[in-house]
DNA sequence: ACTTAATATATAGACATCTATGTAATCGGT
DNA sequence: ACCGATTACATAGATGTCTATATATTAAGT
């Protein structure tokens, strides 16, 4: 049957997400970066855009809960990629700063990001890219 | 800027997946079903289609590793929804069977599945549905 | 000023998932 | 018929994630 609708977007979306995660992990591995999960990468990428962000803000940006981000930062700190600094204006706030070691990873993450885009968009025409993003946005609004 | 491509399909896909998961959890909760995660539901749904499947086959169908499925079944068994039975043809194989209690959940999962489809496809035209599935399939093939 | 509420982060415990490994049963070649 | 390889499942340990709760600091109301 042609043009059959199978109604398994939920399943395909899950597979794509897993695919992206695995791609990130294997690329990090290729570059000898170990002990880092995709969410840790999300945090680092946020900090590349703007260094010295509070924990809470990072949690919002990467769409994880604040306790999760605390634990993620624990690990990034232990690995020497970031450090904590208390805010001077409000000492409840912990600001997360990249170390030099953390900053050095930026090109790797940039490369991984490009690779993901190549996999996702590489087989699509410009029209299809626009269609895709438009459809996904439309769906997201309904949750 | 109109029709701008933002290249954040990966992020949107993640959010949709989380949205689906949360919807499942809240619906199960509404029906008083507790201690069940989406993956447990995936297993039950497989068994509704065909009862008495081996662990390995379940793992393939729900796209989890076999050890993960073993643990998921441990829980379903503990909750009384399924039971293990050794195959008579090949005693290495463990067949998973629904109990009556497990069978009783079928209408709930059917309802949840419909609800998910409503959220995902409810705002789309038939053309858009076809576009979406076509695009997602195209992307999936590239992983 | 003092008490209460709100906010920011951390900690604890639980869970799904993974990889690596163990164990038991079956298959296959000699 | 036996021994090595394969297959199926289970177990162990690690990790990311969550909810619930604790701690510490700031803000607000009386």
Image (cartoon, coloured by chain):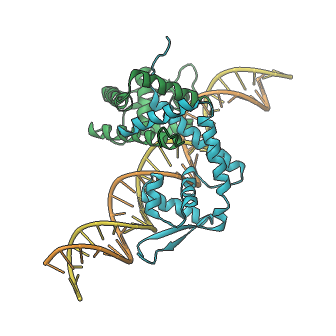
Chain colours: A green, B cyan, C orange, D yellow
Q: Position of residue B83 (x, y in %)?
A: 57, 69
Taking the spot 56% from the left edge, 61% from the top edge, the residue there is: B75
Taking the spot 59% from the left edge, 30% from the top edge, the residue there is: B125
Quarter assignment of residue A17: top left
* Foreground residue among B86 and A62: B86
Left or right placement of residue B7 versus residue B106 in this view: left
Taking the spot 58% from the left edge, 51% from the top edge, the residue there is: B37
Farthest residue in the top direction? B1
Q: Position of residue B5 (x, y in %)?
A: 45, 20
- Whether residue A89 is visible: yes
Quarter assignment of residue A42: top left
Q: Position of residue D29 (x, y in %)?
A: 81, 22
* Foreground residue among A98 and A59: A59
Q: Give the answer, above or below, for where A130 lies relative to D12.
A: above
- Whether residue A76 is visible: no
Q: How many marks?
A: 0
* Foreground residue among C19 and B32: B32
Quarter assignment of residue C27: bottom left
Left or right placement of residue D17 versus residue B93 in this view: right
Farthest residue in the front direction? A1
Q: Pick the quarter of the image with the C terminus of chain B.
A: top left
Q: Position of residue A113 (x, y in %)?
A: 36, 28
Q: Give the answer, above or below, for where A9 lies relative to A132.
A: below
């Amino acid at each position: 049957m042609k043009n059959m609708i199978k109604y398994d977007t939920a399943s395909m979306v899950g597979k794509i997400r897993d695919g992206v995660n695995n791609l990130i992990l294997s690329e990090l591995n290729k570059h000898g970066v170990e002990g880092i999960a995709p969410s840790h990468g999300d945090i680092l990428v946020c900090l590349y855009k703007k260094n010295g962000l509070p924990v809470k803000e990072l949690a919002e940006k990467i769409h994880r809960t604040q306790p999760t981000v605390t634990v993620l930062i624990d690990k990034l700190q232990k690995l020497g990629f970031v450090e904590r600094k208390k805010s001077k204006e409000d000492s409840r706030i912990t600001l997360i700063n990249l170390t030099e070691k953390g900053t050095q990873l930026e090109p790797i993450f940039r490369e991984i990001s490009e690779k993901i885009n190549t996999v996702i968009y590489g087989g699509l025409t410009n029209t299809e890219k626009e269609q895709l993003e438009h459809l996904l946005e439309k769906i997201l609004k309904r949750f």
